[in-house]
Image (cartoon, grey):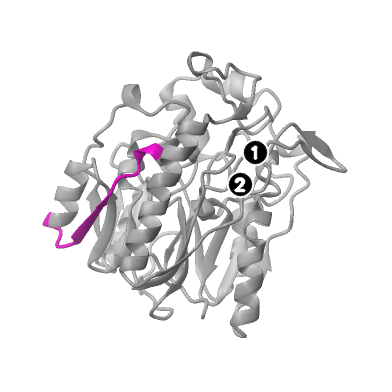
Amino acid sequence: MKVNSWNGWDPLTHVIVGRADGTMVQAPEPAVVRDWPEHGFPAGTYGRLPDDMVAAANEQLDAFADLLRRRGIRVDRPEAIDFSRPVSTPDWEQGSMFGCMPPRDVLITVGNEILEATMCYRSRWFEYLCYRPLLGSYFREDPGMRWEAAPKPRLTDASYRAGFWEEYERLDFDEQIARVRENNLVLTEAEPLFDAADIARFGKDLFVQLSMVTNRSGVEWLRRHFPGHRVHAVTFGNTHPVHIDATWVPLRPGLVLHCGEREAEEELVQYFKVNDWEIVSAAPPARSWDDMPKLCFCSPWLSMNVLSLDQNTVCVEASEVAQMELLDSLGFEVVPVPFWDVAPFGGGLHCSTVDIHREGGLEDYFPKRHGRF
Ligand code: NVA
């Protein structure tokens, strides 16, 4: 057993796959708004997702785990805790926790290190506990593993812009995108905050999306924490950015998948181009916003939330035919995986996993500098 993973495409041999058990529509808190009156959860209410949805999601998660095992990949699973419990710190009380379906949000492996992210939802403050049994066992099994946790945030009201959501939802698209570009969103800069899923790993380059859950101080913390890397703060033309892995997805050296609807900064595009990377636009998703599963807080672009098993093999949601055809035309073996029942629990195939071991080492795929990169 060895912890090692530097990018999103080297051959995968060990992975964590999340669980749907006990997932909540979380209690209200400053960082997140949930409002699903048509599905029993109007704003301000909270509770467990229905048992039939949990069962359907777990069936798909278990089948995905089995598929990976059949390909020789070691699969570990987190331990759900009672997410319905209220939690508190000396600074705040929160009516419930959330769940442990998307390990990608909480943990990131960089080389021989597994880092626990700060997170910024009070409902997710304790989520790392679901992974501690696994992390402890890796620490015991692999004498080379580095186990790190970013500073636990205070998450007092000073960490959130008061009245943000009411003000933001009144802005038009261009005004919202201007706010996204300057990262003037719900988080203040009171303390470093980031979700691990806002980081895309391309060897020596780590691209970190400034978002609703990641602030500039969070990126600065990552920059100082990984002095051997180039850590870049990036934004995209997405009005509600949360996690980079349905926007800018590494597929193999020289090829990145981009959600064309979410415009990349020109300087980022040029950085890829001068280094001979091809930027491919993801295919249109199979679903529209109108036929998303109920209680889902993700976008139809989960279609591009793919998991690479190696440079030539990629797992794609089984109904995303256009996305599969695109990847097939780019020379990939495509492994279809039914997964839309998992979406209401926090994401797609990439979100639901975290790499523990991929073969290969640290490489520099961007030898040429461009602009601020
Ligand atoms: N929040 C993103 C999902 C990231 C995997 C989206 O909905 O597109």
Residue receiving disc 2? 215
Residue furthest out toward the right: 90
CA–CA distance in space, label 2 to label 1: 7 Å
| Image quadrant containing the C terminus | bottom left
Between residues 339 and 51, which one lies in front from this camera angle?
51
Please state if 361 lies on the left or on the right of 313 as rendered: right
Give the x, y percent position of residue 103. 53, 54
Q: Quadrant of residue 99?
A: top right
Q: Residues within 10 Å of mark 2 (few under 14, many from 20)?
A: many
Residue 187 has which mark? 1
Name the amino acid, label 2: Asn
- Is residue 298 positioned above or below 118 on the image? above
Q: Secondary structure at mark 2?
A: loop
Please state if 145 lies on the left or on the right of 180 as rendered: right
Q: Residues within 10 Å of mark 1 (few under 14, many from 20)?
A: many
Callouts 2 and 1 close, C-beta under 8 Å? yes
Q: How many marks?
A: 2
Residue 170 has which mark? none
Please state if 210 lies on the left or on the right of 82 as rendered: left
Between residues 123 and 211, which one lies in front from this camera angle?
123
Between residues 298 and 56, which one lies in front from this camera angle?
56
Give the x, y percent position of residue 110. 52, 70
Residue 320 drawn in magenta: no
- Is residue 229 positioned above or below 50 on the image? below
Q: Quadrant of residue 151?
A: bottom right
Q: Quadrant of residue 174?
A: top left
The residues colored magenta run: 329-341
Please state if 260 lies on the left or on the right of 160 as rendered: left
Residue name at image x 44 percent, y 49 percent = 244
Q: Secondary structure at mark 1?
A: loop
**Reading the chain from its start, which is encountered first: label 2 or label 1?**
1
Residue 340 drawn in magenta: yes
